[in-house]
Image: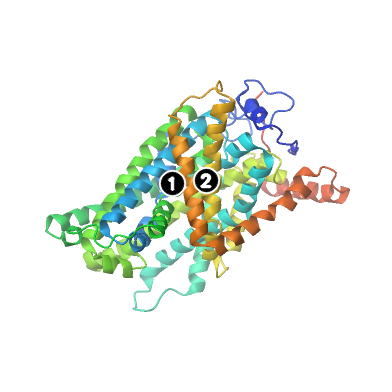
Amino acid sequence: MVLESDQSGGGDASQTAAAISASDGGPDDKPARPESLGNSSDDSRVALKAEIGLFSSSTIIVGCIVGSGIFLSPRGVLDSAGSVGMSMLVWVISGIFSLIGALCFAELGTTIPRSGGEYAYIMACFGELPAFLLLWVTLIIINPTGQTIVALTFAYYVIQPFYQIEDCPPPDIFVRLMAIICLALLTFVNSWSVPWATRVQDVFTVAKILALIVIIGTGLVWICMGNTENFQQPFEGSKNGESIALAFYSGLFAYAAWNYLNYLTEEIKEPTKNLPRGIMISLPMVTVIYVLANVAYFAVLSPEELRASNAVAVTFGQKVFGRMAWIMPVSVAMSTFGGVNGGFLSLSRLFFVGAREGQLPEWLAMIQVSRKTPMPSLVFTCLMSILYVFVPSIDSLINYFSFMTWLSIGAAVAGLIYLRITQPNLERPIKFNILLPITFVLACIFLVVMGTVAAPMDTLIGIAITLTGFPVYFLCIWYKKKPAFIMKINQNITHLVQKMFVVVSEEKEA
């Protein structure tokens, strides 16, 4: 059962969206009808199953958002904002902005019920080429480097308590090997069972939220003890202009991953209900927790202490917990471990969907026969991440594509506006005021422009790497008459993957 690649052109975007909303598949439809995928009661069918309920939907969002950012880097917001009061405003506004974006994605995810997040929405609204460019940079840079950085952070903080000697950080090779172990272990868990992966996400999300509650509770106790000097003149030293834009970049980075549940739309039970509910439960919760955590940090640490810290939560723990300060690095480790798991659970589906659309090798869209998991896509994601473990300048690679993150998310929400205009009668289980997507798109444009102004060389390098996707697209997707030996190599690789992992192409509902 080899999946035949559907490499038909994207065609008119309105026709594509119409095909998505059609109730019956036709000969020109995409490989499978999204409403049926993962929602069949027939458990014998080899397909992704709808096994994610409302609680796990919420923990996936919360667990992916709450990674290392809130524990390690609130100082980035303070440095750019200049004052305690302005920092708190940035955290609140960043949370509201993320909620608006997530609500737009809730409408997109219920209108276009496909897994794949912004890739699927750009494909439906604007066609194959722009969708492939996003897929290309996500494949080679964004996804693997993001996973690797979080895994390296986990590795450092899980090893760090064993190296308590001052000025003696953990050996670099140990950190990198532990990161590889983390990536391999979570690949196994996600390959073995989707319920296992969601349980891991549930457990570690609860653990990291409890850690933040400990921080918040401690901070409130300090405030009740009269430690309010850092709040006396909250806006003294506030900055403006470009610095505030950079503060929002730091704040929004900490809220990143609010869109990850949309990568799993087809695996959510009753997605038209649980996708928007999961979003509306998790985003306000994260915003409240983030704001209160920063209140706690400022209650215990002076702005100068916070600016001097590379790991704010660890410095916080050293000041208030004494011998129990090891709780904080362990909390960071648990948080990042859950973040890596959430990345595997959600982002691996992007490559699965890309292969199903005919834009990646067909074996990436295959499913393990007995486990019903996208094992090839997960293993591929793991191997790509491991390749970057030993890259010394991985942070700069992330910087090159900051603009691409907001450009792609903004384009997806612009697609929502486009569908409102071109297909007003398209079925929309939920529909928000048009001002929400318009406001969000304008804010994304602002972030892309300000990011380009702040780091023009990084943006140019990112654009140059993105443009390499053009020849790949035209040679591998647009051009149909491939040499026979290329087709033979592709077929042999597909058969090898099928034999190694016991995978077949997804079975459509009868």
Q: Residue furthest right?
A: 484
Q: Is residue 360 left or right of residue 431?
A: right
What is the x, y in percent for residue 214?
25, 54
Q: Name the quadrant containing residue 28.
A: top right
Q: CA distance from mark 2 to mark 1?
A: 9 Å
- As shown in the figure, which amino acid type bears the numbered disc 2? Leu
Residue at position x 65%, y 58% in the image:
465
Instruction: In the rendered structure, find residue 201 and report the number of the disc placed on it.
Output: 1
| Tags 2 and 1 touching, CB below 8 Å | yes
Where 379 falls versus 428 (above or below)?
A: below
Graded by Cα atoms within 10 Å as few (under 14), some (14 to 19) or many (20 or more), the crowding at tag 1 reads many
Q: Is residue 132 left or right of residue 151?
A: right
Q: Residue furthest front?
A: 241
Q: Name the quadrant containing residue 427.
A: top right
Q: Secondary structure at mark 2?
A: helix
What is the x, y in percent for residue 263?
54, 41
> How was the colour assigned to the protein in this rendering?
rainbow
Give the residue pinned by disc 2. 345
Q: Name the quadrant containing residue 234.
A: bottom left
Q: Nearer the viewer, residue 477 or 454?
A: 454
Graded by Cα atoms within 10 Å as few (under 14), some (14 to 19) or many (20 or more), the crowding at tag 2 reads many
The answer to whether residue 39 is visible is: no
Earlier residue among tags 2 and 1: 1
What is the x, y in percent for residue 30?
68, 31
- As shown in the figure, which amino acid type bears the numbered disc 1? Gln
The answer to whether residue 112 is visible is: yes
Q: Nearer the viewer, residue 382 or 312?
A: 312
What is the x, y in percent for residue 241?
39, 57
Image quadrant holding the N terminus, namely: top right
Q: Nearer the viewer, residue 241 or 139?
A: 241
Q: Secondary structure at mark 1?
A: helix
